[in-house]
Amino acid sequence: MTKTLADMTAGERQARAGMWCDIQLPGGDKATAIFDRAHTFQTDQAVLHEPGFSEKWIAEYKSVTPRYDLPRAWNSDGTPVKGKWENTRTPDNPHDPLLRRRFISEYEDRTND
């Protein structure tokens, strides 16, 4: 059986910050988001981040299962993961003045390069 955040100590949960997790939603649906941190006031709840959305999610620890098969979004101390990075611009706007750093994952499909 896979451990949820509820099955872990506070230290173990803190070490999972930056990991992708499955979230069991009310009604039986599932979602995937990044575990950010423990909730400041609710001792049994996690704060999660779903890329593309500005709001954070709140979920009970018993509903959140870390995904060890996916690469981390960031390290538990907030630093970027080690790996290969490249500088890139927004694909639909090559004249975009903002240069961004992008992580190249071993899971990424690079067949069209």
Image (tube, rainbow, N blue to C red):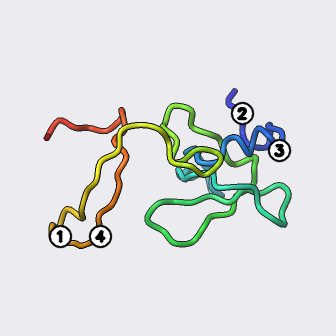
Whether 103 is drawn above or below 44: the answer is above
Q: Which residue is mark 3?
A: 10
Q: Nearer the viewer, mark 1 or mark 2?
A: 1
Q: Which mark is residue 93?
A: 1
Q: Residue at x 66, y 42 (%)?
A: 16
Q: Nearer the viewer, mark 1 or mark 3?
A: 1
Residue 42 x %, y %: 83, 63
User: Secondary structure under badge 4?
Assistant: loop
Instruction: Work out whether mark 1 precedes mark 2 in sequence or the reverse, and give the earlier one.
Output: 2
Spatial CA distance of label 2 from label 4 is 41 Å
User: Which numbered disc covers residue 60?
Assistant: none
Separation of disc 4 and disc 1 at Cα?
10 Å
- Of circles 4 and 1, the one toward us is 4
Which residue has dot 4 on it?
98
Q: Earlier in the sequence, mark 4 or mark 1?
A: 1
Which percent across, then down, holds residue 105?
Answer: 37, 38
Q: In front: mark 3 or mark 2?
A: 3
- Amino acid beneath label 2: Lys
Q: Is residue 92 above or below residue 3?
A: below
In the rendered structure, which disc, 3 or 4, sits on the residue that comes first in sequence?
A: 3
The amino acid pointed to by label 4 is Leu
The kind of secondary structure element at disc 1 is: loop
Which quadrant of the view contains residue 94?
A: bottom left
Residue under the point 55% across and 50% down: 30
Q: Could you tell me which residue is drawn at 31 percent across and 38 percent down?
A: 108
Marks 1/3: CA distance? 44 Å
Image coordinates for residue 103, horizontal then vertical, percent: 37, 46
Say whether marks 3 and 4 touch (CB < 8 Å): no
Q: Nearer the viewer, residue 107 or 88?
A: 88
Side of 50 where 63 appears, left or right? right
**Does the CB distance between marks 1 and 3 fall below 8 Å?**
no
What is the number of the mark on residue 3? Answer: 2
